[in-house]
């Protein structure tokens, strides 16, 4: 069991009562005179974020925590508490539906996350009681998937290069009894995935392709693809210092694909799952690919390199080509692809592109239910014009400063036949500032919504 939870009913559980300013008066009627007097004497108003500890008058031991919130429906209300409360065992004192309790417990677990590879863990953490009516397994699978993604993304590029990321995929595969193949031989890579090779060849740390499979061949095929750029310097079109600062997170797409795969496999969804991770480091070197080069792709389309910093779509296009060769029933890719998506939607709102409305609409509904924000952007065909090259089939970067997230998605769409349902996520994979349940650093986004969608679709 994760150390931020307990199922031990015999421990003394301290209730946490969340309340809004408007609810304060009515909640006071449920408290005893001592407690009411205490709250009045400290002029407690239940302002959002304000905590008050009520001790037992006889012993001074903590008896009840009141917590001011803006909206009790918001799961993240519970996400900030693991870093605020003293060690102890707590229970939610509010009457919530089982769905709300489940989400509250997930938010708690996500808020208890610590990245401890280079810094000692704080082991004296508060624990949340999980009642037997809740599905603890489901909570744990969700939280562990998020931790996996966060740990991979938070690890500096020096310690999470192409070899280490591939190794992390192997570890996940062996833990879950999945088959995994890693293609890293230079000749083989150059033949099978020429675009991945072209992007990765400039680094001392060799590129590779991870191909993981799990499940029954007869079951519906679902394929996840994740962009694994372990560090993105921008290549010869080098980024600014500030633009490069967070680029250890440019493998966030691969981290998302692995994390969702782990969750789906742990939940034993009746699907044949495949995970394809194109993994490179985009480096500056004498052997790096250049602006003006024309490279081959697995599909056979040629691409003129306009900008070496638009490398994610190049490695993804070979992985997508590989994916569609076996005609999966559903193809999902994750990528920290464009700054334009962040300009449009900000860091917390992943952009979704989809070639089938029904799937997108359903997913957006689950996103709302699961409080896992996603916003759809259009695959607006007329902008395909912007990717024209006079010398090759395509240019890797648009000849216009507008609609960068859409043109990147349209580039990818060149490699996905219309009849294959496809979801493309352009996401940040990073919390720019700490918010309740979401500490600054690597973040898993869209996974709760996707898991819910896939479980609804495939679990009979
Ligand atoms: Zn780049």
Image (cartoon, rainbow, N blue to C red):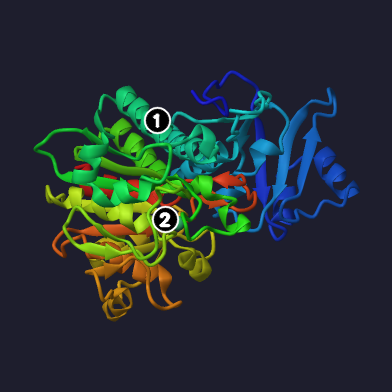
Q: Is residue 428 left or right of residue 298?
A: right
**Residue at label 2?**
369
Which circle marks residue 29 in the picture? none
Q: Position of residue 35 (x, y in %)?
A: 81, 40
**Residue at label 1?**
168
Front one among 69 and 393: 393
Q: Is 441 drawn above or below residue 407 in the view shown?
A: above
Secondary-structure class at tag 2: helix
Q: Name the residue: 29% across, 79% down.
A: 385
Secondary-structure class at tag 1: helix
**Image quadrant where residue 70 sits:** bottom right
Q: Name the residue: 30% across, 46% down.
A: 197
Label 1 crowd bin: few (<14), some (14–19), many (20+), radius 10 Å: some
Front one among 346 and 183: 183
**Image quadrant where residue 292 sits:** bottom left
Label 2 crowd bin: few (<14), some (14–19), many (20+), radius 10 Å: some
Instruction: For residue 236, say whether it is visible.
Output: yes
Question: Which quadrant of the frame does ligand 1 lie within?
Answer: bottom left
Residue most extreme to the top: 10
Instruction: For residue 29, say whether it is visible.
Output: no
């Amino acid at each position: 069991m994760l150390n931020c939870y307990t199922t031990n009913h015999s421990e003394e559980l301290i209730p946490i009562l969340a309340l809004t300013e408007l609810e304060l008066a009515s909640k006071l009627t449920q408290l005893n005179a001592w407690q009411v007097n205490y709250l009045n004497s400290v002029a407690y108003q239940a302002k959002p974020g304000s905590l008050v500890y009520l001790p037992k008058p006889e012993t001074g031991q903590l008896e009840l925590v009141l917590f001011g919130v803006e909206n009790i429906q918001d799961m993240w209300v519970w996400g900030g508490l693991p870093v605020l409360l003293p060690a102890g065992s707590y229970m939610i004192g509010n009457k919530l539906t089982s769905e709300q309790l489940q989400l509250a417990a997930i938010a708690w677990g996500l808020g208890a996350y610590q990245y401890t590879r280079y810094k000692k863990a704080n082991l004296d953490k508060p624990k949340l009681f999980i009642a037997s009516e809740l599905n603890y397994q489901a909570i744990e699978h969700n939280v562990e998937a998020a931790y996996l993604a966060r740990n991979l993304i938070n690890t500096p590029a020096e310690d999470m290069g192409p070899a280490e990321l591939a190794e992390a995929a192997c570890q996940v595969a062996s833990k879950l009894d999945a088959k995994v193949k890693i293609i890293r031989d230079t000749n083989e890579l150059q033949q099978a995935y020429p675009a991945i090779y072209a992007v990765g060849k400039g680094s001392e740390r060799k590129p590779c392709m991870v191909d993981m499979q799990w499940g029954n061949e007869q079951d519906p095929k679902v394929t996840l693809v994740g962009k694994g750029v372990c560090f993105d310097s921008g290549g010869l079109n080098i980024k600014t210092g500030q633009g490069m600062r967070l680029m250890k997170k440019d493998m966030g797409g691969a981290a998302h694909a692995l994390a969702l795969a782990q969750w789906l496999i742990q939940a034993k969804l009746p699907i044949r799952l495949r995970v394809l991770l194109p993994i490179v480091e985009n480096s500056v070197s004498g052997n790096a690919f250049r602006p003006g080069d024309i490279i081959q792709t697995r599909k056979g389309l040629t691409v003129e390199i306009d900008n070496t910093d638009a490398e994610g779509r190049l490695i993804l296009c070979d992985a997508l080509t590989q994916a569609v060769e076996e005609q999966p029933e559903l193809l999902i890719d994750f990528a920290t692809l464009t700054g334009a998506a962040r300009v449009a939607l900000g860091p917390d709102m992943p952009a979704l592109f989809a070639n089938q409305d029904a799937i997108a609409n359903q997913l957006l509904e689950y996103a709302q239910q699961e409080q896992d924000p996603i916003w759809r952007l259009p695959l607006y065909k007329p902008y395909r014009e912007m990717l024209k090259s006079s010398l090759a089939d395509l240019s890797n970067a648009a000849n216009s400063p507008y609609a960068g997230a859409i043109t990147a998605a349209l580039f990818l769409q060149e490699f996905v036949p219309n009849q294959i349902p496809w979801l493309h996520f352009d996401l940040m994979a990073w919390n720019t500032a700490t918010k309740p349940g979401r500490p600054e650093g690597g973040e898993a986004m869209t996974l709760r919504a996707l898991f819910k969608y896939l479980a609804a679709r495939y679990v009979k």
